[in-house]
Amino acid sequence: MNRILIIEDEEAIAELEKDYLELSDFEVCIKNNGTDGLDAALSENFDLIVLDLMLPGVDGFEICKEVREKKDIPIIMVSAKKEDIDKIRGLGLGADDYMTKPFSPSELVARVKAHLARYERLVSSSTVSNDIIEIRGIKIDKTARRVWIDGEEKAFTGKEFDLLTFLAEHPNHVYSKDELFREIWDMDSIGDIATVTVHIKKIREKVEYDSTNPQYIETIWGVGYRFKV
Ligand code: CA
């Protein structure tokens, strides 16, 4: 259930908004002054804030500014004065919408729904699951093709990245150099299985504390390599 925070000092208005939002299955919390409102906005998890401009304590300008520094949830600012709305638009405080009081509660509900839907689309598109592999100190982001060793990012060439990722995706499986060469390199690429040895050596220099005693990519003598878990 989506949680809405209403920061509004006129209690009758706040209650009316709350009733309408609750009828649409929102969970609603009201704060009647700016100080409590700002505190709740920063310390609790809400999905959207309906923020009155003129408030006792901290005003809506300041609340909007402070919340924006920490959170990107939608903020709908409301004010009785059309001039104030024009002014806050001009300030670019980062509110998502503005409404002039009085407005119909159903109009508010419609806007709340629209902003939540838009926000959810934004959030889901920006967190499109980057494919992450984490094994002990190694973190591989397959989507971004980046690698961190103990939190420090290291640069890998394309083939080094492909080889490391392939081995890490099949931990404990022993692959021969032939198999790895076929897997990572195109059949018509120049090179031979010695290329695999060279690439393993370069990867080890980046991922291992001690290349002569590897903790990640192990040599299985006479067979090949495996990624040790
Ligand atoms: Ca007010």
Image (spheres, grey):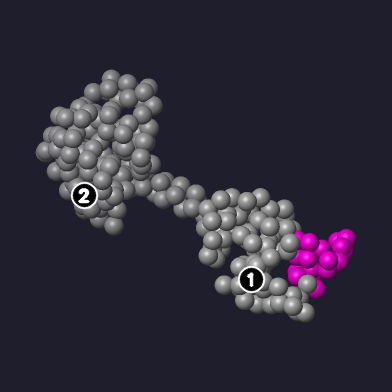
Instruction: Determine the residue positioned at 16% across, 30% down.
Output: 57
The residues colored magenta run: 178-199
Residue closest to the eye, 40 or 102: 40
Residue closest to the eye, 87 or 46: 46
Q: Position of residue 76 (x, y in %)?
A: 31, 37
Q: Is residue 55 magenta?
A: no
Residue closest to the eye, 95 or 68: 68
Residue lying at the far left of the rendered structure: 12
Q: Amino acid at mark 1?
A: Phe
Tell which tag, 1 or 2, sits nearer the viewer: 1
Q: In the visual, does 185 lie left or right of 219?
A: right
Q: Position of residue 125 (x, y in %)?
A: 50, 51
Q: Which residue is mark 2?
A: 28
Q: Is residue 71 above or below residue 189?
A: above
Instruction: Determine the residue positioned at 74% across, 78% down.
Output: 221
Q: Position of residue 72 (x, y in %)?
A: 38, 41
Q: Which residue is mark 1?
A: 227
